[in-house]
Amino acid sequence: MFEIGNTLREARLRRGLTVSECEVGTKVRAKYLRAIEEEHFEVLPSPAYVRGFLTTYADYLGLDGRLLMDEYEHRFGAGTDVERRREERHQRARARRRRSRARGGRSAEAKLGWLGLGGAVVIGVLMMQGMGDPAPETPFVPPAKDPAQAAGSGASEEVAAPLSVRLRGEGDTGSFVEVHRETSAGAQVWAGLLKSGGTKSFPITTRLWVRTYNAPGLSVTVKGKTRRFTGSVAAFTVDQNGVVPEKAGN
């Protein structure tokens, strides 16, 4: 038995690397790398991502990822206290989200009720003001059309639908995904777990930067074209031209 976190930390220090430099090289967020080095595996999104991050980090540092994975499974695998605590934490988070959505729905219903009552009052006032002798109606005379405009009036103008990107969870576990504006340092648009079959769509009003922590568990569709990735972690940008994978080290 050996300590997974200390083994990774010592390998990183031997190479003279900081956690931030490893974040760039592995495409795994620094807070997750620190959690792995401290063996706080319950902080990571789910067991699937623990295994992916651990293997990626070990390979990046030149260690035997399979050996570290075997040790993780032995000490922290299914049925251990760590797995149970992580599942309890996820269940509590799901319950909080359900309660939040329920409160939001009740608030929206109350607002609509007040709006409906206010609209009824306004209509009643207008009807009362309109009682009495009706004003004589003035016949409507359509304005004369300019000949040039009349000639081109047959062509209908079409408004193009806004371009969007659709992310879909695939496989058995789906993928944990981050979406930022422009670059990885840009404002976060969304982050969360896309379970298998789940979808999330975003309008492409500006370039989006996306990172998946389980690349085979995600598909990306733009302009009717679907793209998939390999490996444990992948990053790419999406703009009006489609999907562009991010080169290693960027």
Image (cartoon, grey):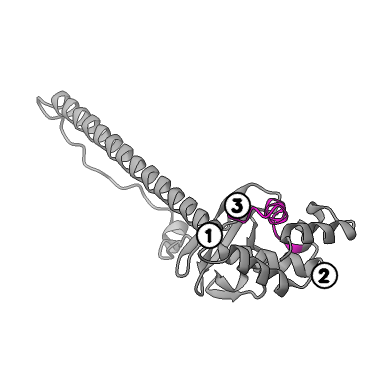
State the residue position of label 3: 43
239 to the left or right of 78: right
Image quadrant where residue 151 sits: bottom left
Q: Quadrant of the N terminus?
A: bottom right
Most foreground residue, 37 or 166: 37
Sequence-earlier tag: 1 or 3: 3
Q: Quadrant of the C terminus?
A: bottom right
Q: Residues within 10 Å of mark 3 (few under 14, many from 20)?
A: some
Please name the residue shown 90% across and 56% down the image.
Answer: 16
Location of residue 89 in the rendering, given as x and y in whole percent from the top left corner? 49, 51
Cβ–Cβ under 8 Å for marks 3 and 2: no
State the residue position of label 2: 62
Location of residue 162 in the rendering, given as x and y in whole percent from the top left corner? 51, 59
Image quadrant where residue 116 sits: top left
Which residues are drawn in magenta?
A: 26-43
Sequence-earlier tag: 3 or 2: 3
For badge 2, the amino acid type reads: Gly
Please name the residue shown 23% across and 33% down the image.
Answer: 119
How far is mark 1 from mark 2, CA to CA?
27 Å
For badge 3, the amino acid type reads: Val
User: Magenta span has 38?
Assistant: yes
Decide: is 191 above or below 215.
above
* Element type where label 1 sits in the image: helix
32 to the left or right of 247: left
Cβ–Cβ under 8 Å for marks 1 and 3: no
State the residue position of label 1: 83
For badge 1, the amino acid type reads: Glu
Most foreground residue, 136 or 67: 67
Sequence-earlier tag: 1 or 2: 2
Please name the residue shown 67% across and 68% down the image.
Answer: 71
